[in-house]
Image: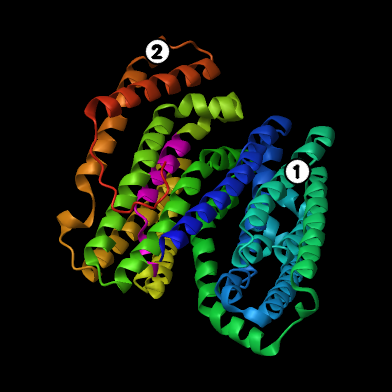
Amino acid sequence: MTPRGRDELSRASWLLTGGRAMALAATFFIPMVLARVFSAEAFGTYKQIFLVYYTLFLVAPFGMAESLFYFLPSASGRAGAFVANATGSLALAGAAAGCGLLAAAGPTARLVGNPGLETHVPLLALLVALSIASAPLEIVLIARGRNLAAALAYGLSDIARAVGLVLPALIWHSLDALLLGAVVYAGLRLGATLAIYVREFGATLRPGRAAFVAQLAYVAPFGAAVIVDTLQANLHMFVVAHRVDPATYAVYAVGCLQLPLVDLIAGPAGNVMMVRMREGLEAVDREAVLSCWRDTMTRIAAFVVPLTVGLLVLAPSLIEVLFTARYRASVPIFVVWTTSLAFAVFQTDGVLRVLGQTRLIFGLSVLKLVIVAVSIGPLLGAIGLPGAALSALTATLVAKLAALHVIRRRLSLSLPDLLPWRDLARTTAIAVAAAVPVMLARELLPPSPAVGLVAGALAFAAVWLALQVGLRPRVERPCAESPEF
């Protein structure tokens, strides 16, 4: 890749990261607002509704939207056919998922252990159908090189979605009102998506048989992997939902809080790593490949490890500030769940893709599904709700270790050469050392959770920064073009 090409790739990455950041900022606080608007039982039902929604949203498309990343960049005159095929297929998949949900309203409610969910299924089915049909919008824009438009689509879509969810809930304090607002948003997005497609492709926006056959051949194995990965990622949530009442499920869902900052940083860094490693493999430059792999881990760890340790030490105040004292019981679950953030340091899936080990990625998803299925019952019985989170954490740990073993063998590495052990140990030691004063001074902080959270966060950041500057780390940067944190 030429220097100009690298600059363009870096600009595109940062532009899309900015769009995703805007989107995440718009949606991150939705649950915090709704936790205050609804009772614990209603909030738990809301979380169950969207557990079903996101599961169908990821499974039903069967990878057809993602196929456009593969076909559009080199599609030339057939781009409109690929988009029309994907849009038509997704519209049918969304309609089928919605109809299936309507037909299985009772079993779905029993699956999540909440008979009251059945009354919300009609609006949920409509939301699923409309959302799936418009899913490829950002993918189409990225694949066509419209990076600014894609960034705006990410940000503006999620701002509109946040308004559609929160505003009706604030006015009417009703789950059906919230769902109706989401349906209106999904309908507007679908209309905007179709208008953009017509403007982008014009008369070429029509289905093509040859293009459709090629897409089907591509998505078959990929779609199967998506289904298994989605099931293993959500299985612990469904098991808990089935076994407890909605209010208790709300406690568990709050404990499994998704923190988008990690994906926002690790995702682009991992993407750049894959590009650089692929270049190194094509140039038969083994040292460049290894340096980029280790350097990426070092860079991600510099952000993720302190964040993880800080969240762990501030967990009680953080949960109470974000979700009120009603959800204090979520803290032990949050501690277990947050520990898994550290696994983002090891971008093993990216390396396996570079090495062409896509079947192994699928196999690891199956392995994680089996581990959760086997371990969640005993762990729930032994330690309660944190056991379900520990089951998911264990599955991820085993899969990461297996992936690292394969990477070590494929790259013919000794164990000392596999990871940047010294950098990781140093980063971890500094983060833990910064947490110690906060833990010791916790009893001296004011009883207010908000004041305690701010004071604790500032103390942690100050000690961490002082240690970073005082120890003057020497960090090699062979992956010079990767994003800086």
Q: Which of 186 and 485 is in front in this view?
A: 485
User: Which residue, given by chain and number where applicable, does mark 1 sit on?
Assistant: 165
Identity of the residue drawn at 53% across and 19% down: 449
Q: Position of residue 435 (x, y in %)?
A: 33, 25
Work out which quarter of the rendered image holds the N terminus and state it: bottom left
Q: Which colour scheme is used?
A: rainbow
Figure check: 166 above or below 8: above
Q: Position of residue 425 (x, y in %)?
A: 23, 40
Depth check, front residue: 426 or 127: 426
Q: Residue at x 84, y 33 (%)?
A: 171
Q: Name the amino acid, label 1.
A: Leu
Q: What residue type is labelled 2?
A: Glu
- Please state if 211 lies on the left or on the right of 436 as rendered: right
Inspect this view and state whether residue 332 appears.
Answer: yes
Residue at 57 percent across and 52 percent down: it is 16
Residue depth check, mark 1 versus mark 2: number of the one nearer the observer: 1
State the mark number for residue 443: 2
The main secondary structure of the magenta stretch is helix
Q: Is 352 above or below relative to 346?
A: below
The quarter of the displayed image where residue 148 is located: bottom right
Identify whether 228 is placed above or below 380.
below
Label 2 CA crowd tier, 10 Å (few <14, some 14–19, many 20+): few
Question: What's the residue at 71%, 77% (across, down)?
Answer: 80
Task: Please tell me whether residue 346 belongs to the stretch shown in magenta.
Answer: yes
The residue range painted magenta reads 332-353
- Which disc number belongs to residue 132? none
Quadrant placement of the C terminus: top left
Label 1 vs 2, first from the N-terminus? 1
Give the camera-side residue of 480 and 440: 480
